[in-house]
Image: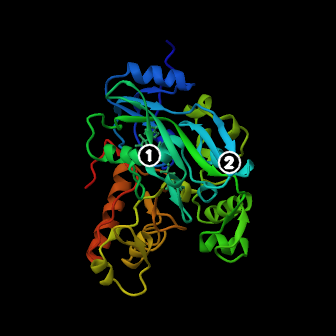
Amino acid sequence: MKKFYYENAKFSDLTTIRVGGCIERFFQPASKESFINLLSEEKGPLFVLGAGSNTLASDETFAQTVVRTRFGKIEVVKKQHEKALIRSDAGIIWDDFVSSCAQMGLQGVESLSGIPGTVGAAVVQNIGAYGSEVSETVAEVEVWDRKLGRVEVLDRSSMEFGYRTSLIKKDIQSQSPFAPNSRFVVLSALFSLSCESFAPIKYGSVAEQLKKPMGSAESVRNIRKAVLAVRGAKNMLEDPARYKSKIMKDMTPERLEGLPLPAAPNFDRCSCGSFFTNPVVSLQAASLLPPSAPKYPASKGVKLSAAWLIEHAGFEKGYPLKEHPRAKAALSTSHALAITNRGSAGASDVMSLANEVRRGVKGKFGIDLALEPVLVGLEEK
Ligand SMILES: Cc1cc2nc3c(=O)[nH]c(=O)nc-3n(C[C@H](O)[C@H](O)[C@H](O)COP(=O)(O)OP(=O)(O)OC[C@H]3O[C@@H](n4cnc5c(N)ncnc54)[C@H](O)[C@@H]3O)c2cc1C
């Protein structure tokens, strides 16, 4: 069987933060069938990589197998009256999926426009933004179960979705015997969307962009456009330039061919997005914070803004570039939650800044910040 093996692959070429060492065995199957064949043959440890937008890998050579998902199709399974069931393979770029849904006038994922990554990882991470989470639309997830060695279907309740987590993410974080991956590899996901092409505006900055009041109805296409504009202003969009590196050439999705490279690199885009999740704390812990600290009701307490905590612990946007303009890793100059690679950062530069920020927030407010990206070959200290 042809195994779609590529030589000289490096995590630094395959992740949005552009950090990480060489990969000893790297495969990129071109179809779901060859992906399943590969998974059924590879019994040893492996890491499934999507678009690398939430992965921070060590600078050491990764001596195990990496399989990258870059295959797939989007299929309308059923469209009847008010509901549509749409299936997407795991390797589809998430924003291509959102764009297709918006073009079909389907409602449910428009607020998640412009989030980098693949459909497979979107359900693992339970991505969320601007008042929506992907779990609200997931009907079921088709997985390869590495323990049973067969395809299984997990319905929405079995996925144990929570804030930026799922059954699969919890398995990754709990030292799964299948580490560095989970027992489950996502093959496809089935989404249940509404055929109502007007949706309520759920978020203040999106309402401002649309110049309409919160809660008023707007077409899903216009909401998508507004979300892309708001994200673009914060450098929180995918960076197509990274698909231009040498190793990626024969893996480049067609849609990105011909896109011009930016004149100067935009280092604010070399990140994993938010490096920290918003902490959820008890009512009592929240009451100890100053009244100006944003607090949102959550199912298990109060959700705080990690960005507010970071900035009020003394780490302004761009930290530490003011004192150290040549710092290798720094907070994004447009978003305090994102740690960025300013061109030559290694994993240790990123982790030491992350730990400095965590210590600062703990010291000032007594609150622990949890990391959002998946660490490969790195210890969380
Ligand atoms: C600029 C920027 C902005 C961002 N904004 C947001 C945001 O607004 N909201 C948000 O929630 N996130 C955001 N993120 C984080 C990121 O986009 C998401 O977490 C995304 O879902 C990661 O997708 P990926 O394919 O790149 O995952 P990867 O980084 O490739 O993988 C992440 C994890 O998922 C696992 N995985 C990947 N594919 C599969 C599969 N098929 N089966 C099983 N496991 C798999 C990997 O093994 C790994 O553990 C942002 C990131 C960046 C860089």
Residue 183: quarter of image: top left
Q: Percent from the top left, x then y, of residue 144?
A: 42, 30
Nearer to us in this view, 333 or 361: 361
Q: Percent from the top left, x then y, of residue 33?
A: 53, 22
Nearer to us in this view, 145 or 272: 145
Query: Is ligand 1 less than 8 Å from the beta carbon at label 1?
Result: yes
Q: Image point 40% across, 62% down: which residue?
A: 277
Q: What residue type is labelled 1?
A: Val
Instruction: Check the image and report above or below for 106 versus 188.
Output: below
Residue assigned mark 2: 101
Q: What residue type is labelled 2?
A: Cys
Residue 331: quarter of image: bottom left
* Residue 368 in view of the camera: yes
* Residue 52 in view of the camera: no
Q: How far apart are marks 1 and 2 (CA)?
A: 20 Å
Residue assigned mark 1: 124
Instruction: Check the image and report above or below for 140 versus 32.
Output: below
Instruction: Check the image and report above or below for 277 versus 286.
Output: above
Q: Image point 34% across, 67% down: which residue?
A: 300
